[in-house]
Image (cartoon, rainbow, N blue to C red):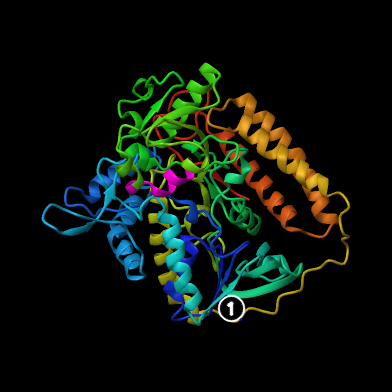
Amino acid sequence: MIDILIIGSGAAGLSLALEVADHAKVTILSKNTLDCCNTKYAQGGISAVLGADDSLDSHVADTIDAGAGLCNKEIVEFTVSQGPERIAWLIEQGMPFTQVSDNKGNVNYHLTREGGHSHRRVIHAADATGKAIISTLTAKVKAHPNIQVLEYHIIIDLITGTKIGLSTSRCLGAYVLNLTTNKIVALQASFVVLATGGAGEAYLYTSNPDVATGDGIAMAWRAGCRVANMEFIQFHPTCLYHPKAKSFLISEAVRGEGGKLLLPDTSHFMQDFDPRGELAPRDIVARAIDHEMKRLGCEHVLLDISHKSEKFIIEHFPNIYHRCMALGYDMANQPIPVVPAAHYTCGGVMTDRCGRTDVEGLYAIGEVASTGLHGANRMASNSLLECLVFAHTASVDILSKLKSVAPPPKLPSWDESRVTDSDEEVVVSHNWDELRRFMWDYVGIVRTSKRLQRAKSRVDLLQNEIYEYYSNFRVSNDLIELRNLTLVADLIIRSAQQRHESRGLHYTLDYPNKKPVAQNTILTP
């Protein structure tokens, strides 16, 4: 019997596991290796008020401004207020944040500035903060006797009482496919926590790893949870443009430290779109790049920080520098080509400040959740802050209830009696490609009502095909992910169709203005 089943192994899931493990039996499921997650690829850092010239009010104001008026102010204030304490907890775990010495020989943590921030408040580990977080937390998780790690396991679906004929709608566990043995088991748990990340793989070009297929959002929806603000998909403005780079992210901190965006003729353009130039929020920068690429018919723009010394660049961005060099770009002496790519799912499963969803016993934390923090656009480096804060609040809430949960009934085994092995795997791969292409073309950085309707017609056909396929053949990793991703794409499209304005990350040519009152888009199963 599992006390707490955590689905996902990024910063949110690992943090929660460590916070509860001294008092509960924990199992963490990962679709791949434990370190294969979005967090690992986060370069910039974690935003928190740590500088003497900064303030909580300033961080709150910057977050709400970036969120285009749609943030929940109470949640923003609560999250920001928890920042310093959560950073201290991470340091206690052994997190190696970058330090610098001042003129008097005092050593402090180095803070950088990113788009949307009015102060330097992003604490980081060089330009590979996410990798350092995962390395630090993974070591602690593997050493804890109360934490079981199951790698290469993918959830097929959550199990609720109503799904198995009981009167309760409580989440009781999940059906899990072991990708090594291809066996399906039912895992019982007193509490289930979704920490599955976002859905960047719904788009043709994304900075996310292949595991970001919206699994948690889809599973929660099928279990009866509401979702909110799914139309707000953040496109990171600067991914390296190279056929072998697989959308390698160029950190926002490069612009924070003085990097300039240029057209192919090396002229500047960001000041034409926003007085903050390169330090405008991501939605504005991505839209500006998209506009210029379409206007000029070019495949990319340029990012130039070569006016800084090679020593400065290597010290601040060692991983980015060496990755670019390996691909033939010397960022210390030349501009590098960049393009926008799908990066972050700002909406998700609706939760409260403790991570509780609409289904009893089911929690959602991190990118999979819609807490009200990000509104219509996430400000840079607030995502890892959200992971740490809500992992903590969820852990406190779960532990307060753990002893009072009644043992769940025995769960029925997965039924494969009426399915066969597929001889048409090409259907899955074809549908996967079609989905990602029409989402990029019709539900991307700039939208129209006609494009959205085209996307809706296509996603409806795909869902019908996938339902028939899922009903008749044995499940596989690709089929499970495609089923989830297609459902999430449908939720994105439906949400976008309901928003008749342009706000934050949702920009439509048919409704270019912002409505006077900001409202959430909430979908109910």
Q: In which quarter of the image is the N terminus?
A: bottom right
Residue at 66%, 63% (x, y): give it.
155
Whether residue 217 can be seen here:
yes
Is 322 in the magenta? yes
Q: In this view, does 237 lie above or below 353?
A: above
Q: How many marks?
A: 1
Q: In the image, 418: left or right of 486?
A: right
Residue 525 belongs to the span the image colors magenta = no
Q: Name the residue under label 1.
A: 2
Identity of the residue drawn at 30% across and 39% down: 257
In screen coordinates, is 36 left or right of 329?
right
Q: Element under label 1?
A: strand
In percent of width and height, residue 322 lies at: 45, 46
Would you say residue 355 is visible in this rendering? no
| Vertical order, 496 against 28 (above or below) | above
Query: In front: 188, or 345?
Result: 345
Report the front residue among 24 and 307: 307
The location of residue 50, given as percent across then percent down, is 24, 55
Indicate the position of residue 438 as horizontal and vertical percent values: 67, 33
Q: Looking at the image, which residue is at 43% across and 64% down?
A: 391
In the image, which residues are magenta?
315-324
Q: Quadrant of residue 406?
A: bottom right
**In the rendering, at what x and y percent does residue 483 appear?**
71, 50
Query: In the shown orientation, is residue 139 left or right of residue 122?
Result: right
Relative to 311, say whether 35 is above or below: below
Q: Which residue occupies the foreground of this view, 33 or 456? A: 33
Q: Which amino acid does label 1 sit on?
A: Ile
Q: Residue furthest left?
A: 104
